[in-house]
Image (cartoon, grey):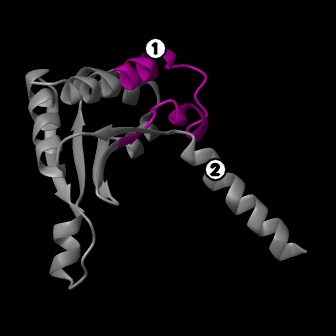
Amino acid sequence: MKLALFSLIVITSLSLSAQNLTTYRSPKSVDETVEKLVEIIKQKKLAYFETVEHDKVAEEYGVEIPPTRMILFEDPNLMIELISCRQTTALDLPMKILVWEEHGDVYIGFFDPKVMKKRFLLNECDDIITSMSRLKVRVVNEALKDD
């Protein structure tokens, strides 16, 4: 009985967190998608930190995984406002966009910043979090536009 209850809690938790994952299908390859996202981030004069190539790291350890890249960036103004509102929100920064290949398709995904409201018990900062959500959507939509 305890195992069944524990399993239900785990499945419910995973389902709830999956609902906060925003995904888009990209018609481009992983490399082309990442290149376009980084280009848009730089065009918007956002702070681009790096692209973590998880598949390359895995390869160094003798494990092959499909292409999986994490883009790290932020809007310095939004970051300053958010951290000024609640310093612990820095745990979710910089912003991240994941690009990965799964079963031959390429996807772009990110967690909606609105999850921070619950995670950090925020009753304020709504405008900042909404701006972060919109920024991620704009960056992805611009990267998916035909050139």
Q: Name the one closer to the observer, 139 or 82.
A: 139
Q: Residue 48: within the magenta? A: no
Q: Is residue 39 left or right of residue 125?
A: left
Q: Is residue 42 left or right of residue 82?
A: left
Q: List x then y, in percent, for residue 59.
A: 18, 77
Q: List x then y, in percent, for residue 100.
A: 29, 54
- Identify the image quadrant of the C terminus: top left
Q: Amino acid at mark 1?
A: Asp
Q: List x then y, in percent, for residue 65.
A: 27, 71
Q: Residue 124: within the magenta? A: yes
Q: Is residue 7 left or right of residue 73?
A: right
Which residue is disc 1 drawn over? 127
Q: Residue visible at 15% across and 25% down?
A: 146
Rendering quarter of residue 46: top left
Which mark is in front, 2 or 1? 2
Residue at far top of view: 127
Res. 102 mark: none
Magenta region: 109-134
> 82 above or below 63?
above
The reply to whether dot 2 and dot 1 touch (C-beta < 8 Å) is no
